[in-house]
Amino acid sequence: MTTSNNSSTSGDPLAEFTAATTTAAVFDLGQRTQLELTGADRQKYIHNFCTNEIRNLRPGQSCEAFVTTIQGKIKAQIFVFAEENALWVDALPGYEDLLFAHFDKYLITEDVQFHRRSSEYVEFYASGPEVLSRLAGLGLPVADLGVASHLRTSVESHSLAVRRVDWLGVPGCLIQVPAAEAAGVWNSLTTGGLLPAGRATYDALRISAGLPDHGVDLTEDNLAQEAARTNLAISFTKGCYLGQEPIARIDSMGHVNQELRCLRLQPGPVPEPGAKVLMPGEVREAGVVTSAAWDPAAQAPVALAMIKRNYLSPGTKLNVVCGDQELGATVFART
């Protein structure tokens, strides 16, 4: 996970998990995909290629969206942040080339310039109910930063952007830092009341919160609504965009045939991606695990799985195949 070569963790998964859910922890997410867009048509242009309302974002506002194919399938999950003179597109590592090529392909006369910034920045994610107050204690003006809001500021002469995205089910901030300043910012955060935490803890929390990793939990084979993030990432009033027709048609039909769901498993081994999800006592397949992790608080695995429509309701009892055994699992609603 770490690409900034400056982070360390506490080494105690339970302490990390507890801090991230009850006080404050910080994760090094490394160099995620960062595209900066400038030009007068930047928002209108990107609005035409993703599922959420981009055109009317004001400076300091943001949203989650899917970049979709003409068939309404997911090319990438993105987070878009509007600034006074720029629009930032943030995604998982490794998507810069794909997004740049996709957006640039349709550019004709629009006033839009794309700037590849992925190698220039490192991103940290600070999570926990006390995260805003602890960041404020470091001198960052974020005490009242609302969900989907963001700002540019500095700490101890280090410039950074703080973006409020509650990815893990509690208050959280994505912190964008110039790569050359990452070590100094990490030190300020971890000596200023945020416990350093690692990838295993982050995965347990993101899975429990229903946050998918594209390329792991979602692929270009998945329709946008199968991600189960419709309320967060899809607007049905924004008008035309690439992939809009099949997405609107699914909405009018009322459902897709499968959706991503969180599963809480009985104590046992962590299932591998691709593990079958079955109805108890039957060989009938109800879905497939896409990612899983150990929850140190529950002392049991949690998983994300693509589940068939008949088995989506919270509380549904299922079994997950783990090697030569089946572990009981329950569909649960993310917080």
Image (tube, helix red, strand yellow):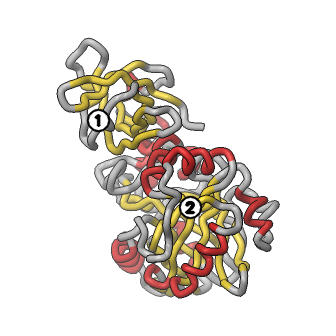
In the rendered image, the residue lying farthest to the front is 11
Identify which amino acid the numbered label 2 is placed on. Answer: Pro
User: In the rendered view, would you say 212 is above or below 300?
Assistant: below
Q: Is residue 326 above or below residue 178?
A: above
x 26%, y 23%: residue: 326
Looking at this view, is 159 or 198 the one in front?
198
Q: Which residue is drawn at the image coordinates 67% and 45% (left, top)?
A: 22
Q: Is residue 161 above or below residue 335?
A: below
Mark 1, secondary structure of its residue: strand
Q: Residue furthest left?
A: 324
Q: Quadrant of the N terminus?
A: bottom left
Image position, residue 10 (x, y; %):
52, 58
Say which of marks 1 and 2 sits in front: 2
Q: Residues within 10 Å of mark 2 (few under 14, many from 20)?
A: many
Residue at image location 70% in from the left, 67% down from the top: 192
Q: Position of residue 26 (x, y in %)?
A: 58, 61
Label 2 belongs to which residue? 196
> In which quadrant will I find the C terminus?
top right
Distance from the alpha carbon under mark 1 to that under mark 2: 32 Å
Whether residue 215 is visible to the viewer of this picture, yes or no, is yes
The answer to whether 93 appears left or right of 129 in the picture is: left
The residue where tag 1 is placed is 288
Q: Residues within 10 Å of mark 1 (few under 14, many from 20)?
A: many
Q: Which residue does the image show at 42% across and 36% down from the upper left?
A: 302
Q: Earlier in the sequence, mark 1 or mark 2?
A: 2
Residue 174 appears left or right of 249? right
Q: Amino acid at mark 1?
A: Val
Of 231 and 330, nearer the camera is: 330
Residue 273, image quadrant: top left
The secondary structure type at the circle numbered 2 is strand
